[in-house]
Amino acid sequence: MNNKNFICKIIENDLKNKKYKYIKTRFAPEPNGYLHIGHAKSIYINFEIAKKYNGKCNLRFDDTNPDTEKQIYINSIKKDIKWLGYKWNNKEKYASDYFNIYYNYAIKLIKKGLAYIDELSINNIKKYRGTLNKPGINSPFRNRNIEENIFYFKQMKKGKIKEGKMCLRAKINMYSKNIILRDPIIYRIKYSKHYRTKNKWCIYPMYDFAHCIADSIEKITHSICTLEFQNNKVLYNWILKNINIKHIPKQYEFSKLNITYNITSKRKINILIKNKIIKKWNDQRLLSISGLKNKGYTSESIKNFCNYLSISKKNNLIDIKILEKYLRENLEKNTIRIMGVINPIKIKIINLKNNIIFNVPNHPKNNKLGKRKLTLCKEIYIDINDFKEKNKKNFKRFVLNKKIKLRYSIIIKAIKIIKNNFNNIKYIKCIYIKNYNKKINIIHWISKIDLIKTKFIFFNNILKNKNTNIKFNLLKNINKKSIIIKKGYIDKNILNFKNKIFQLEREGYFKIIKKNISKLILNKIVSLKNKKNFL
């Protein structure tokens, strides 16, 4: 991470002016879903900034909503952060650890006349709040006396009030231009079992009330979050100021990450699961961290991508191809390369008398990855896309009555096409050409002796809509070709490799899902940048 972004400049200025002795950041997700690529950006920024300035980064779960939060999400979040290569400061923390503290600060606001118990329904609270062009209206319960407010708040805590009948609101300004300041709710009743505190509490602080207090308790110096919280900053500061807490963190916002053809919204992902478009959060078509990891992405490629992204206040749409570029760069140098045929068509080399064995490199530029043996026999397979009955403009592969070189091997010439009763190609008769020294194009192949039957799974963008920032009907924009399955062949040498990820030459990078002599299943991670005609 370079120090040219605005957050690093602020931190360096703070350190220079001795505002802080050390830097302390935090990553504070709500455990109501799995992490996605946007969270990866936030993780990268918070942990890397702490590392850069010899500070610390806390992991805190903002678990103040018992309806949506689960231990399974806690476990997944911790696992994903570790997979990305980061270690948080000491033991992870929880907003629920501070429930008593939040409660006491709420009492403090009531005693200062800055909070009141409201009996308006949620719908009426929204109605009274007004709009951007219309000021709010004071609640008829706004001027309750302090003693009455404390009494009802304690009754709420004891479970004496029905859910939805009362809430605690901050008393700020119903005429403020910032709607956030129009007496926001800071406590509500929820008779739901909390995954950690069980049934100890039936009142829970709202995120905006709890978050800033937790930051202060943990002595966070720079509370770094996405731009969606920019309007909430004024409430963040108001709460800290009026509860007279000693440590005052500063909130700074950066742009949210949006990527073409993909969604990261937890609500929208749950819609996909509910409609059985995907099964789980780790689906390879999602940009959840578990989905990317499941597909075959590396932690290094994701961090390199995050490093590329600018830390700014301007929201933008990032092309998915940029994320794929960093994955390719990460895999290119140390990934074994192998040949296979996804759309096979049979070739018979009629004048080849004996099998020929070739020792070929597992990587053309990395000798440390070793070599493997290929056996050329009379019957081989090539890809149907590499062959044309008649030559076409700019087609530089295999054509009837033309010569082609088999990768690492011999030169052959197609002399006859044998078709079935449906006029489909059954196989192509070829002859082996000796002593041909001119430059010639190359195609990939696999012999009948070396092949293993393989199922290839291709994952494409889950959405047809490129710009996911605009409003669109989610279910009507699902790409029906987001999963494509093909059956072909691959070099059986793959069974000897320990690594699960490899490059299928000229096709892309693949991950082994199931591996044995009778069944091999691969999923495609990412395509190659360019599909060249000769190698």
Image: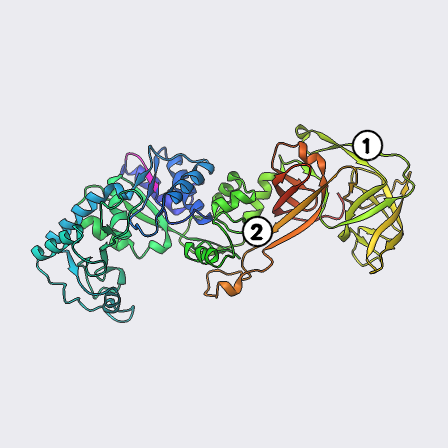
Local SS, label 1 = strand
Decide which of tag 1 and tag 2 comes sooner along the chain: 2
Q: Is residue 422 above or below residue 378?
A: below
State the CA–CA distance, disc 1 to disc 2: 39 Å
Residue 23 is a magenta residue: yes
Q: Residue 475, image x and y in percent?
A: 50, 63
Q: Quadrant of residue 495?
A: top right
Quarter of the picture containing the N terminus is top left
Residue at left 83%, top 46%?
347
* Mark 1 residue type: Ile
For disc 2, the marked residue is 321
Residue bounds of the magenta highlight: 21-26
In front of the other: 132 or 447: 447
In front of the other: 322 or 81: 81
* Mark 2 residue type: Lys
Residue 231 is a magenta residue: no
In front of the other: 251 or 218: 218
